[in-house]
Amino acid sequence: MHTEPHPDPAHSGRNPGYAPDFVAEVLDDALSHDCRVYALAGLQGTGKSTLSAQMTALGKQRGLRVTALSIDDFYLGHAEREALGRHVHPLCATRGPPGTHEVALACDVLDALRERREIALPRFDKIADDRLPRARWAVARDTDLTILEGWFLRTPPQQPVELAEPINALERDEDADGTWRRWCNQALAGEYPPLWERLDRMLFLQGPGFDIVPEWRWQQEQSLQAQHPERKAMSHAQVRRFVQFFERVSRQALRTLPDLAERTIRLDARRHPLPPR
């Protein structure tokens, strides 16, 4: 694990943004290590997408071609997840947890970007809960740096004994026999390592704990609704239930990623980076 001091960006509220010197420092970290694929990890609401967008804009100012992706871009489509819900477990139909991504597609896209080949970039419509049609995918070419952000990048699976007891009401009431959580854990162990191997370097934005995630995720949903007032995003109650799908792997990420990431930056409850311990 490597932790280093950072400037304190103004990063709070519903539409957060990191300070320019902080963004520059993170971009320089990627470039100084000759990364072709730089990973930003952190639980929901830590500001990964915001930081990724700011790094992309700064890279453009410097004359670089930076391509920003999210693990969310590779969600399985609605119909595919509905099929998993019928054949594996009803909870598999909900996007987010390990097992609900097209990992092979993600690997193919990262390989193309690393090799500077032209490639179409998948995009997922979270309000529609489905992948956008291929005709609406942007095309990238001659990419100098790819940024992949995601909430559970490099997170290792749990031991089987750790899956025995439910961690929240969702698992207790809707996965009493543990079928769903074992399926997610098996996917994490078997499907995702090839994707993790494609990440040259990773920064982990470490929030104060999982308990703040529901609040941060609700802020995200409010922002999404504000961007699309003509469409209906999730309600507060729906968000509170939704984050329970992520709780088990999120807590595993908090336990393990500080030792697996090349760099870790701790954040307080307002998303201000803290000095290293």
Image (cartoon, grey):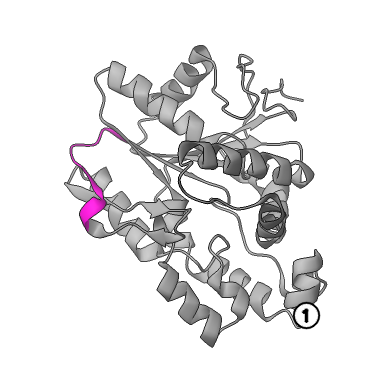
Residue 248: quadrant of the picture = bottom right
Magenta region: 135-145
Rendered residue at 47%/68% (across/down): 191
Say which quarter of the image contains residue 64: top left
Magenta highlight on residue 225: no
Q: Quadrant of the N terminus?
A: top right
- Residue 84 in the image: x percent, y percent? 50, 79
Q: Is residue 241 visible?
A: yes
Say above or below: 9 vs 229: above
81 relative to 15, above or below = below
Q: Nearer the viewer, residue 141 or 190?
A: 141
Question: Which residue is nearer to you in this view: 228 or 97?
Answer: 228
Q: Is residue 139 above or below residue 242?
A: above
* Residue, disc 1: 176
Residue 46 x %, y %? 62, 36
Is residue 186 something that shows in the picture?
no
Q: Residue at x 64, y 46 (%)?
A: 257
- Between 245 and 117, the one lying in front of the other is 245
Q: At which x and y percent is residue 219? A: 64, 38
- At label 1, which amino acid type do we have? Ala
Is-magenta flag for residue 139?
yes
Percent position (x, y) of residue 268? Answer: 74, 28
* Foreground residue among 58 and 227: 227
> Which quadrant is home to the C terminus?
top right
Name the residue at the bottom extreme: 87
Please identify the residue farthest to the front as the structure is shown: 230
Dot 1 crowding, Cα within 10 Å, few <14, some 14–19, many 20+: some
Left or right, 184 with respect to 241, comes to left
Q: Secondary structure at mark 1?
A: loop
Q: Is residue 220 above or below residue 187?
A: above
